[in-house]
């Protein structure tokens, strides 16, 4: 019996081994088999055939043009909605933009007081604002006082210049008659009489405009104070609402844009000062009245690229024409053109550099858009905002996260 039990146990063990080997072979074969193909989607054969025939009838270029067209229409619609929102919210966006520019302008002084003098943020921001207001008030006082002192003499010379122009129109190559000149002046007088009501209304609304201007200035000062004191904390709070993967790239792009804005404002101030100094000294040595107010106008006009320099230079030439005659005006015109060429081809590329440079076409479009949306202030803040957006977008494109090589290989397969 013992030998029979051993034989039976061996047979049972061999049978179990054969079962396990067979099961292992089945599992291996199942693992090596490819995944079953997904079931083919149910398609309407008639509709698919009709669609393919219709597409075949449409030229390939027309299909590409149609695909681009609806995408461009979506982009234009999005831009139109954005511009509409900016127009509706310009009362809020204009003070924020001006405060941002002032914060960038005063940032070096703020950093000096924080790092070298070791002042707390609130006190440093307050002192910077007080010094800035004092400088602006001093310059305005000098400009207004000189303008008031010299305006009567300039008005008398302007009337003499108008009389000389009348004489030249009568005795010059045009040979206009006195009747034609009188008709022109009568038409101008009639226009003034017809529009006296609107001019009076504008004068009546001056008080309201003054109150709105003071409120705007207070809001700008208030926002500038907090931008200088808590600018970094405000930016981290704003970007904190973004999704986590986009939070750090947007923050870094914003910091790069801020550095660009600081560099742009500082370079613009330096270039404007050089322009104002050159044209102001030229007017001073030519004994043109209002040389200091005109230099200040050139300084302020330089903050609006291309357009501002042209307008302020034209005003300087006209004042020189009225005050000293055509020869002096021609010399001033040559000096203004020389200074503008020096600014455009030497100063701006050297001081601003390529990092904050903006194409002239983009400058003109930005200024035109700013004028349409917010007038002169819009033209003032348009170009710096375009420079900031340019830097931020370029930073995001250059530092975007690339997929790992393995992921690229798998996706290509």
Image (cartoon, helix red, strand yellow):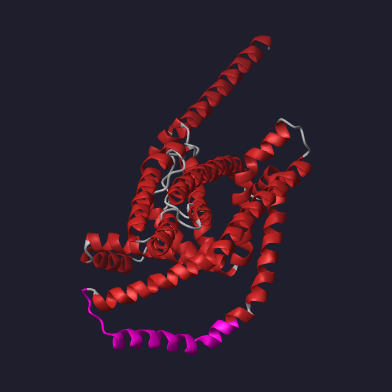
- Residue 357 in which image quadrant: top left
Q: Position of residue 208 (x, y in %)?
A: 67, 75
Position of 195 relative to 21 (above/below): below
Q: Residue at x 64, y 9 (%)?
A: 3
Whether residue 375 is visible here, answered yes or no, is no
Position of 147 relative to 107 (above/below): below
Position of 73 relative to 333 (above/below): below
Q: Residue at x 37, y 63 (%)?
A: 43
Whether residue 310 is visible here, answered yes or no, is yes
- Residue 62 in which image quadrant: bottom left
If the image is split into quadrants, where does the C terminus sit? top left
If the image is split into quadrants, where does the N terminus sit? top right
Near-viewer residue (344 or 226): 344
Q: Tally the numbered discs.
A: 0
Q: Residue at x 41, y 84 (%)?
A: 188
Q: Residue at x 37, y 65 (%)?
A: 70
Q: Position of residue 41 (x, y in %)?
A: 40, 58
Question: Is 140 situated left or right of 405 in this image?
Answer: right
Q: Position of residue 45 (x, y in %)?
A: 32, 65
Position of 183 relative to 39 (above/below): below
Near-viewer residue (357 or 110): 110
The span picked out in magenta is 173-201
Near-viewer residue (24 or 374): 374
Report the magenta stretch's main SS: helix
The verdict on residue 61 being magenta is: no
């Amino acid at each position: 019996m013992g030998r029979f039990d051993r034989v039976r146990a061996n047979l049972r063990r061999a049978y179990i081994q054969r079962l396990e080997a067979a099961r292992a072979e089945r599992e291996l074969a199942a693992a090596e088999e490819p995944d079953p193909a997904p079931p083919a989607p149910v398609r309407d054969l008639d509709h698919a055939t009709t669609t393919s025939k219709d597409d075949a009838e449409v030229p390939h270029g027309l299909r590409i043009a149609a695909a681009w067209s609806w995408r461009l229409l979506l982009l234009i619609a999005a831009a139109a909605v954005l511009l509409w929102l900016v127009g509706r919210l310009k009362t809020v966006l204009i003070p924020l933009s001006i405060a941002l520019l002032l914060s960038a302008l005063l940032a070096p002084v703020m950093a000096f007081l924080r790092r070298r003098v070791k002042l707390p943020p609130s006190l440093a921001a307050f002192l910077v604002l007080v010094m800035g207001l004092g400088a602006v008030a001093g310059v305005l006082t000098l400009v207004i006082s000189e303008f008031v002192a010299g305006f009567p003499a300039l008005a008398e010379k302007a009337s003499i210049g108008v009389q000389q122009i009348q004489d030249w129109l009568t005795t010059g190559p045009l040979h206009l008659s006195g009747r034609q000149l009188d008709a022109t002046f009568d038409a101008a007088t009639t226009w003034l009489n017809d529009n006296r009501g609107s001019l009076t209304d504008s004068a009546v609304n001056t008080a309201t405009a003054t109150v709105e201007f003071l409120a705007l200035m207070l809001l700008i000062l208030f926002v500038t104070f907090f931008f200088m004191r808590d600018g970094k904390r405000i930016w981290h709070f704003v970007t904190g609402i973004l999704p986590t993967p986009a939070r750090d790239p947007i923050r870094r792009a914003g910091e790069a844009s801020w550095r660009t804005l600081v560099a742009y404002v500082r370079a613009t101030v330096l270039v404007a000062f050089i322009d104002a100094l050159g044209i102001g000294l030229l007017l001073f040595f030519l004994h043109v009245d209002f040389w200091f107010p005109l230099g200040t106008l050139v300084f302020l006009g330089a903050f609006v690229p291309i357009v501002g320099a042209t307008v302020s230079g034209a005003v300087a030439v006209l004042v020189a024409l009225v005050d000293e005659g055509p020869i002096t005006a021609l010399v001033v015109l040559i000096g203004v053109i020389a200074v503008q060429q020096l600014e455009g081809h030497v100063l701006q590329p050297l001081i601003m550099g390529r990092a904050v440079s903006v194409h002239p076409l983009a400058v003109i479009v930005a200024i035109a858009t700013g004028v349409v949306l917010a007038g002169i202030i819009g033209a003032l803040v348009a170009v710096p905002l375009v420079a900031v957006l340019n830097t931020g977008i370029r930073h995001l494109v250059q530092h975007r996260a690339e997929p790992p090589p393995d992921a690229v290989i798998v996706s290509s397969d």
